[in-house]
Amino acid sequence: MGEGGEDPQKLKTMAAAAYDYDNDPRWADYWSNILIPPSMASRSDVINYYKRKFYQRYVDPDLILEPMATGSTSQRAAASSTSTTNSNSNAQNSGYTSRTTGISTTPAPNSTSLRWDRQTIQFSVNAWVFVVAVLAIFPLVPKNLSNRAFRLSFMGTACSSLYSLYSLYGKPRAWNLQALQVWFQSVAVTKDFIYSIYCLTFITSNLCLKFALIPILCLSLQHVAKFLRRNFSRSTLYRKYFEEACVWVDSNTTTLSILSSQAEIGLGFLLILSLLSWQRNIIQAFMYWQLLKLMYQAPATAGYHQRAWARIGRIINPLIQRYAPFLNTPITAIQKWWFRVILRSLKFTVSL
């Protein structure tokens, strides 16, 4: 009975971790009004705690929020530091200057040490992906180098997405069917899982569609801009060269998400057209349309994809009603019709 009572809270915690905070304007206002030291604002555990607190306040009030363990340790550390400084000042007044200087210089290396947390690793990988993707689409780059950069950009994004999944959700608690099912259900609807499958689809393909790099560029650009604004806002180099671009990216995340969804849907139709060429890959086309179906249903991408498919339906449905009334079906049925086309072409290829 105790384990069954913990399952709803576990699902609520996973839902809070999978919530798309970047596209919620309330989160930016909430985070900007939190007064914490700059050294703690860059810590992933502190950010995740305030994200859960935001989720409990605005999305699900039934979420039980556990106290932040880092808060007590930081308070104890602050109390110990104040006690040591007081003792040092008393020692200076009493004449023990050598002992005071020895105590005050010991915590200096720890305060300036470089911390490679999850956000720093994600920033490094995404910045590298952005540079490699730009190199892949630059027209003056040789074809061999461009194709290699094309695959490396997808490999970098896949590694970044898988690392984010592991850092947020970890491994399943047990290696049985029930635990794997609960873990997979919490992971399968996240944006990181969707983009990891998206990248693996093009890494293993012989096609080199540069059009597929648009969602990768938008995703890496958002990660890089967010990290730079949060950690280098006081840097003169950032203010001189990167501030305007980062502010534009943060204020146009919805536009970038809409562009990504339209590019992802367009890639599905390009893969259908590629079945007529010698580079056709029927399995890749079929798997990609299954991924589009997941994007249409997942909460992280459903809003943008449903809006794009609705616009396509408003354009295609009048043409279907006029020229092909036998296809007068909703957009989901059109997707099923494309699946039948892929299967028929697969049978035709096998017969050859």
Image: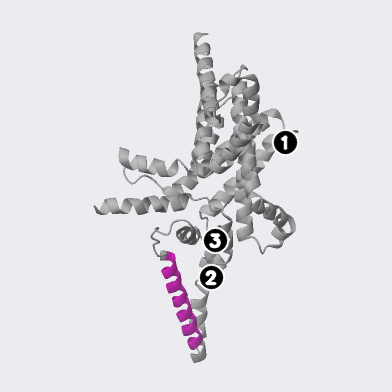
Q: Residue furthest bottom?
A: 94
Secondary structure that dominates the magenta span: helix
Residue 144 position within the rendered picture, expressed as x and y whole percent measured from the top left: 67, 28
Going by the numbered disc 1, the residue's amino acid type is Phe
Q: Which residue is mark 3?
A: 42
**Is residue 245 in view?**
yes
* Residue found at x 61% / y 60%: 231
Disc ID at residue 138: 1
- Extent of the magenta region: 70-91
Asked if disc 3 and disc 2 are in contact, CB closer than 8 Å, the reply is: no
Residue 301 position within the rendered picture, expressed as x and y whole percent measured from the top left: 54, 42
Going by the numbered disc 2, the residue's amino acid type is Ala
* Residue found at x 39% / y 58%: 62
Identify the image quadrant of residue 219: top right
Q: Is residue 130 left or right of residue 97?
A: right
Q: Which residue is mark 2?
A: 108
The answer to whether residue 72 is magenta is yes
Return the disc, 3 or 1, that comes first in the chain's sequence. 3
Please determine whether, in this image, residue 296 is positioned above or below residue 166. above
Q: Nearer the viewer, residue 92 or 262?
A: 262
Q: Nearer the viewer, residue 149 or 173?
A: 173
User: Dot 1: what SS?
Assistant: loop
Residue 159 position within the rendered picture, expressed as x and y whole percent measured from the top left: 52, 41
Please determine whether, in this image, residue 105 is positioned above or below residue 70. below
